[in-house]
Image: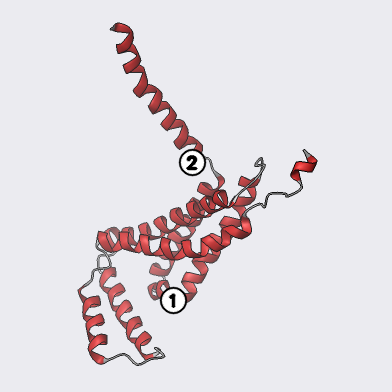
């Protein structure tokens, strides 16, 4: 009985040690470092836009392009390092490398919104809502097909009822942005993967 009790006591410790090693190994990946670096850059950029009274720039297409460009550079740099020592850097590995960067960077970017809304400026959420409504009205005017006034009013009314600072909105923001970027990552990973040499069996 004593022997069995010792084994039961050792299992949680062994599991905890393996979990600690897994987390430590994951944190040392170049993609995690580059994801954090990209996230810090996006985090600081949002504060710069806020302090310079250019918060509306966050909702411009150029900001989305800039954000993905920075993440793309981070993906390129990270995968070059993670390829080293790999006999075959396959599509799955390339996809995970890029996905880690996207998730970490976007999480930190949205976390900047949280800090600004809840700690720095409580009125920023109402400013954000006004900008979103104005951008939506402009988008209505640029639609190739005219939308009915009833539908436009319904969308604007739903938008007015929303709260950009709500935790549900912030989590939804993380999910939607990760999803949109992942669609591009699925394609980018194809170029980062290392194709298996069809003549490798001859070299072996």
Query: Where 85 falls versus 159 (above or below)?
Result: above
Provide the secondary structure element on which disc 1 rests.
loop
Q: What is the crowding at mark 2: few (fewer than 14 residues within 10 Å), some, or many (at least 20)? A: few
Q: Position of residue 166 (x, y in %)?
A: 24, 62
Q: Residue at x 22, y 89 (%)?
A: 150
Q: Are marks 2 and 1 in contact (CB under 8 Å)?
A: no
Q: Residue at x 27, y 69 (%)?
A: 125
- Nearer to the camera, 55 or 107: 107
Q: Residue at x 22, y 77 (%)?
A: 158
Say which element carries label 2. Answer: helix
Q: Quadrant of the rendered structure where residue 19 is?
A: top left
Alpha carbon separation for disc pair 2 and 1: 33 Å
Residue 77 lies, in percent from the top left, at 61, 53
Q: Quadrant of residue 15?
A: top left
- Tell me if I can see residue 78 in this picture: yes
Q: Nearer the viewer, mark 2 or mark 1?
A: 2
Query: Picture coordinates of residue 38 (x, y %)?
Result: 50, 56
Q: Quadrant of the C terminus?
A: top right
Q: Quadrant of the N terminus?
A: top left
Q: Which mark is residue 27?
A: 2
């Amino acid at each position: 009985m004593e022997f069995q009790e010792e084994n039961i006591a050792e299992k949680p410790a062994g599991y905890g040690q393996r979990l600690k090693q897994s987390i430590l190994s994951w944190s040392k990946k170049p993609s995690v470092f580059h994801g954090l670096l990209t996230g810090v850059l996006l985090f600081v950029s949002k504060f710069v836009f806020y302090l310079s009274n250019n918060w509306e720039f966050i909702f411009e297409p150029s900001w989305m392009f800039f954000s993905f460009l920075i993440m793309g550079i981070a993906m390129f740099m990270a995968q070059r390092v993670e390829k080293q020592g790999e006999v075959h850097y396959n599509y799955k590995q390339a996809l995970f490398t890029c996905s880690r960067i996207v998730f970490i960077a976007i999480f930190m970017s949205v976390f900047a919104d949280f800090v600004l809304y809840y700690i720095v400026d409580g009125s920023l959420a109402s400013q954000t809502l006004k900008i979103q409504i104005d951008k939506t009205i402009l988008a209505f005017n640029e639609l190739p097909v005219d939308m009915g006034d009833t539908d436009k009013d319904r969308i604007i009314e739903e938008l007015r009822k929303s709260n950009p600072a709500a935790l549900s909105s912030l989590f939804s923001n993380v999910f939607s942005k990760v999803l949109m970027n992942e669609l591009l990552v699925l394609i980018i990973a194809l170029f980062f993967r290392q194709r298996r040499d069809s003549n490798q069996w001859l070299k072996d």
